[in-house]
Image (tube, coloured by chain):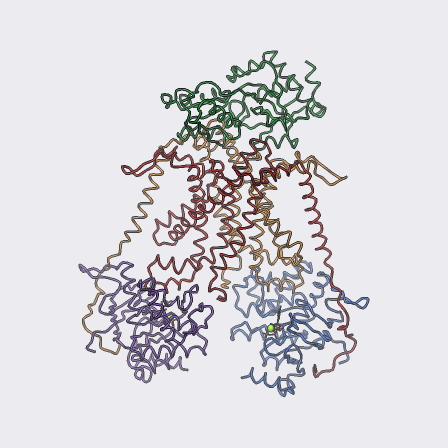
Chain colours: A blue, B purple, C green, D red, E orange
Amino acid sequence: MSASPLVAFRRVSKAFGTFKALDDVSLDVRSGEVMCLIGASGSGKTTLLRCVNQLTRIDSGGIWLDGELLGVRESGGRLHALSEREVARQRLKTGMVFQRFNLFPHKTALENVTEGPIQVQGRRPAEVRDEAVALLARVGLAAKAGNYPSQLSGGQQQRVAIARALAMKPQLMLFDEPTSALDPELVGEVLAVMRELARSGMTMMVVTHELGFAREVADTVVYMDQGGIVEAGTPAEVLGGPREARTRSFLSAVIG
Amino acid sequence: MSASPLVAFRRVSKAFGTFKALDDVSLDVRSGEVMCLIGASGSGKTTLLRCVNQLTRIDSGGIWLDGELLGVRESGGRLHALSEREVARQRLKTGMVFQRFNLFPHKTALENVTEGPIQVQGRRPAEVRDEAVALLARVGLAAKAGNYPSQLSGGQQQRVAIARALAMKPQLMLFDEPTSALDPELVGEVLAVMRELARSGMTMMVVTHELGFAREVADTVVYMDQGGIVEAGTPAEVLGGPREARTRSFLSAVIG
Amino acid sequence: QEAPKAALPPEIARSGTIKVAIVPNYPPMEFKDPATGQLTGFDVDLGDALGKTLGVKLAWQETSFDQMMPALSTGRVDMILSGMTDLATRHETATFVDYLRSGPQFFVRKARAGELKDMTSLCGKKAGASRRTSFPREIAAWSEQNCKDNPVVFVGTEGSADARTQLKQGRIDAAVQGNETLPYVMGLEPDTYLALGTPIALQYTGIAIPVKETGLQQAMAGALDALIADGTYKALLEKWKLTENGVDKAVINGGK
Amino acid sequence: MSSGRALAEGFPDLTGLPTARRAHWGRWIAAALILGVLALVGRAFAQGQIEWAYVGRFLTVPVILHGIVNTLVMAVLAMGLGIALGLVVAVMRLSPNPVLKGVAAGYTWLFRGTPLILQLLLWFNLALVFPVIGIPGLWSAKSVELMTPFLAALLGLGINQGAYTSEVMRAGLLSVDAGQFEAAQAIGMGRLKALSRIILPQAMRVVLPPLGNEFIGLVKATSLASVIQYPEVLHAAENIYYANSRVIELLIVAGLWYLLVVSILTPLQMLLERRFARGAARAGR
Amino acid sequence: MSSGRALAEGFPDLTGLPTARRAHWGRWIAAALILGVLALVGRAFAQGQIEWAYVGRFLTVPVILHGIVNTLVMAVLAMGLGIALGLVVAVMRLSPNPVLKGVAAGYTWLFRGTPLILQLLLWFNLALVFPVIGIPGLWSAKSVELMTPFLAALLGLGINQGAYTSEVMRAGLLSVDAGQFEAAQAIGMGRLKALSRIILPQAMRVVLPPLGNEFIGLVKATSLASVIQYPEVLHAAENIYYANSRVIELLIVAGLWYLLVVSILTPLQMLLERRFARGAARAGR
Ligand SMILES: Nc1ncnc2c1ncn2[C@@H]1O[C@H](COP(=O)(O)OP(=O)(O)OP(=O)(O)O)[C@@H](O)[C@H]1O
Ligand SMILES: Nc1ncnc2c1ncn2[C@@H]1O[C@H](COP(=O)(O)OP(=O)(O)OP(=O)(O)O)[C@@H](O)[C@H]1O
Ligand SMILES: [Mg+2]
Ligand SMILES: [Mg+2]
């Protein structure tokens, strides 16, 4: 581990009221690494992702992305929150895929993908369009570019959401249970796209309950419980022979 | 089968548009009989019950309840529809329990039970109250009389719905999948109440997917398909050794 | 001839226009010709003649009755020339240059001429007049004097047109309007109305000018006297059938 | 917490550092600006040509007090009429009979489509159309005697309100689950009883908030009845300023009263809403 | 169909018998009564003291046509102002800053709580409070010259409308799923861009129907601007009846025009609604 990690969490804590959603978390994600986060409901997985994307603001500690401290600037021994504009700039380095897709319902699949590059990055529409069409083709939806989200199945919508995030050319992709709102027969098509993405070298943090996917694709599996990281290692280590009792009982419950 | 049946369907048909929901159905229900209706979705089970209760009006044929022709009067070789008031009177002979409970949300459990006797039958409130309390006790909800439906679990709501129907002292109870909107752990308490009711001698028509209940409690099991009765007999005959191929394939799918 | 013009306030002399508020709802004093929509009436003719004498143009500003006095206070207009009755209560805000004498007069429907022969036959009856005028008080005063304990019942209406509408329906027995307007109104609907007796009070109608604008007051009074002297005034009176109502000379604040 | 992996060096521990709260300068400047402008406006009003002494003097004179009472009486009665009509019309619109349906739709269209002031004047001047009203042979009366300002205002406001209320009611009735009507039928209730005891009380939850708005609107619309001599508060204020020319001052008096009434009605509405939310607390649909 | 069981005797086969349709006497009698009454009313109107010739003659005179154009121009502009204000105020009410929130709530309370006619007169007579308006040292103007009937009507109607519209907008903004805002943030949009490109277009679906009602109300409320001499259609009608005393006839002329406008607006609203339902066709939430 000589190269500096792409993402570094150091002693990150976050509480909602008195409830500690993240409790002193430290973690590295290397460039090109695919990390799967698993854990029971309420263990803080979503919160961890949202802190990287600054949809949630952390209480203490620090997160560095690509060497840059997120959300705050240190000066004179104090931390100063960044402006909305600076936060928006930092967000561009990450792409986020939500559990409930959150596609823009009033825009077609293509418009969903081009919206960010054109409106936020201010790039030339013609050029962006071509890229977007290519991206949609990459997620297998070339034929659906003109469809509105309501005219797509859940799996198709989630693939558009992935294309939308990729269109911003992020360095890191965040997935929050991307398949858990899907009917079982649609899960496969989304996982296939993610698998392809992993193979292409994208750094990914994936919250998922799909242990098969984790076992096959992840470089690292992280098991979380009660806002903390209980165990992290290769899929073989964490899923195959967990050291911690908590991990074992969780895995046996999930596999059933 | 010497005594006249409590309910008699003769050549009953009902179409919605061009779709035949009931197709020339003839059937007898004896007084005191517990009849379970089974069949695939869309086979016409609900429609059959609703015709007895006149929530749905039949197209042709006749249904007699307690010797009285329902919904129409014959005179001069023609059938004349009864007035709303006469239909309401005929409805009092049946009690209906819906899949989705349909309790009155703005009234307490007790008020739900007393509403009919006081408002429709015009009986003395004090007397009705005492009976209603006894009925709630019978379905195991003496302690919940003052609760609003929103403060009750699904199983409790359904038991209140049964008490509400019983309060009208019907001759026939109709149940339309009374447990299928319930979480698995709540199904038992409702079936227990129905079992007790069957034992007390109430005539019952029950649409259900609970084959165990049918096997144990029913006198007759009727299998419906495409708006018609395919097979009817004792639970042992219909569930144990169905004669018809359609029944066999349905049963294997359900138990499967 | 030079005197009135010299009295004009410098600002008006410079701009050459006087802004005048007018409410065109009081034929024949001022109204809009239904056919052409043009502003017309005695006040309009008189104003234009006054303007000519003074060598200025009159800019007529149509307004509503409620809005006339505020318009004078805010300086939106320089004066009001709109059949306004000179009342002592109004002297706080305005000084009046009186140009007509008139009096509120009862009139009834011709159909009831037999029953309502003279003014005293109105005692105990209902009489209506615009509540925006001083007529309510004058009717009360007249009733006090002439009817004793069988007073005229006053009904305040939205305007004189409304009073006539109510008279036609028989909602009121008599209406009161300034006698200067009666000939015109009776001409509109011939054989409908009948004037009763004589005016019940004597009032002045004047040009309202802010109290502190003494120069404008002098100019107007002077110009009016000039018109009276050269016969223009008399010709206008004849044109609008107002010969009964003329004054011999401009009066300042003649109202009580 | 042990993560089982070595962590890269070079990222300092920030947990000890205090975080300076970001000052939202933009927001606070905007707020300060607005407050400043409000203060200026207030000062100007206090110093302007408005004589506040008049406002104070006339705020509680008997005519004005009487006017505000009349306003409230009329608003309450007209709302009552409007609700009754609105309910009947809403039920008619949902009926299967095409004639009833058409009449109900026409009523809504006509009375929502024409200005209230016209409707008031037409009612008040009904005698132009029907000089005599009655049941031939049985009873009759001269319309002008029957159609007092009070009755004309009540009919005009109430019937106009009925057109608006019918739409609110219709939405309310449609919001109640169809299963409720069937459950009521199943225990032998007729249409009317089911409507009054089962459907309506549940519809109230949806109906009350817009009805509250409508009522506030109606309180203010009552001022239009001044054109037909109904002595409501604006009429009273007008009568005073016709005599003393203090137009703006008297209008402010009326405005303050309206503001008071509206301010009282809002919490009242909340209370009613809570009353009808009975049993729905945790329905969690 | 074989039921496998013997059926009891004594129940005749009714399938051959024709069913006499039940005549809904009650309903048809009600309908007939209503139609009868309508016919009578119509006849009375035709025969009453209303001179329909006048209605016909004045329906299309230039002053009236000019009036209805002015009505529409004012309604459209005031609605525009109202929507802009309503949007800003709605966003302010949802902001975390307590001052902005308070100012927004106060605005809604004040302008919804006072009669529109008072607001119109206050704007028109602003010179009572501010004789001169301007930026000190830079530019100034006499208020009475600035505050024409047109501008006063626009401000009065628009600002009042803004108070109502803000509530509609607030409901609309709240109706959009919070995930949409997060998704917009996630692709790097700022607050404003997210609002204008993502949230608002979706809120329109919820906002349009009540906004349509508000606009119809505004068209009719424009008639109040006649007190400050804005030459809208009712003002034009009044000017004519002051001269010829045909009060009811001219009011009917104005009423017919309003009715026409409202009748045209309703289908227009439908069209707009369909436009903004883009993509929502089968969302099936
Ligand atoms: N905005 C919030 N306000 C209050 N509590 C919150 C908020 N967001 C999350 N929480 C709480 O923080 C805890 C951790 O939430 P988080 O969503 O990170 O869990 P998770 O591991 O993603 O669970 P799941 O598998 O259910 O998505 C939960 O108990 C949740 O209730
Ligand atoms: N009111 C209606 N209008 C049109 N079609 C109807 C109506 N009610 C029922 N149907 C149709 O009639 C058929 C029979 O319906 P029914 O509800 O009786 O079936 P079921 O056996 O109760 O099925 P399930 O197990 O799904 O409740 C279905 O295809 C249904 O779509
Ligand atoms: Mg989560
Ligand atoms: Mg069913």
Q: Position of residue E50 (x, y in %)?
A: 40, 32
Q: Quadrant of residue C147?
A: top left
* Residue E177 or residue E40, whichever sits in front: E40
Residue at the extreme front: C149
- Let me know if residue E263 appears in the view: no
- Let me know if residue D203 appears in the view: yes
Instruction: Residue at 51% x, 57% y: name it.
Output: D271
Residue at the extreme right: A76
Q: Position of residue B91 (x, y in %)?
A: 30, 65
Q: Quadrant of residue B95?
A: bottom left
**Rendered-image quarter of ligand 4:** bottom left
E9 lies above or below C102: below
Q: Position of residue B47 (x, y in %)?
A: 33, 68
* Residue B79 or residue D23, whichever sits in front: D23
Instruction: Residue at 63% x, 60% y: name it.
Output: A115
Q: Quadrant of residue E118?
A: top right
